[in-house]
Amino acid sequence: MKLSDYIKNVPDFPIKGIQFKDITPLLADAKAFKNAVDQLAAFGREMKAEMVVGPDARGFIIGSAVANAMGVGFVPVRKPGKLPRATIQYDYDLEYGKNTLCMHQDAIRQGQRVLIIDDLLATGGTVGATVKLVETAGGTIAGLGFIIELVDLDGRGKLPGYPIKALIQY
Ligand code: AMP
């Protein structure tokens, strides 16, 4: 199955110069969505992950499906003011703009092996912030999984030593 057939490129969204990769056609196709989730879940099992962490908002969609397929739990990483209990937070730069991410401070057990899942790896800012949150909480990064990697932006270069799986590379 060629997963790239289910990704739509949208030029100049949300601002001029960005080639936005729209994953909604993939999510809408039961076979393509299952194929993507199964591949990422296989990677998570291979890396012996015990928990999946996914950043707001497309990381929730893919990450919770991957966690469910693996038979492990899911932890959401959210924008400020959304999580109801005590959080830890981290600030970072996006491909377009700035952001802060938060996670419940008791979400991860000491030494727990965590698979981070997001839809897309661009500059690595989002997943880098999520890595920091997991490590601050005492977790160990088992791996980082994405549907798409924008290779030219070299997010991988910012994440040395972490096992990375990307299903489609542009
Ligand atoms: P980055 O932090 O630069 O690695 O950007 C990754 C995050 O921003 C992911 O959560 C993506 O959903 C979103 N993102 C960044 N660039 C794009 C793009 N060209 N198309 C779709 N989503 C993007």
Image (cartoon, helix red, strand yellow):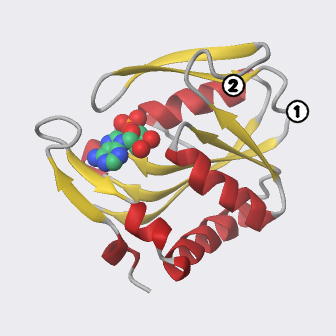
Image: 140 above or below 148: above
Residue 115: x and y in percent read 68, 49
Ligand 1 lies under 8 Å from the Cβ of mark 2? no
Q: Is residue 170 left or right of residue 135?
A: left
Q: Secondary structure at mark 2?
A: strand
Residue 161: x and y in percent read 56, 43
Residue 53: x and y in percent read 68, 42
Label 2 sits on residue: 103
Q: Is residue 10 left or right of residue 71?
A: left
The number of callouts visible is 2
Q: Is residue 39 left or right of residue 7?
A: right
Residue 85 visible in rendering: yes
Label 1 sits on residue: 109
Q: What amino acid does circle 2 point to?
A: Met
Q: Quadrant of ligand 1?
A: top left
* Residue at screen point 51% across, 37% down: 127
Image: 44 above or below 90: below
Which mark is drawn over residue 89?
Answer: none
Image: 169 above or below 139: below
Residue 18: x and y in percent read 18, 42
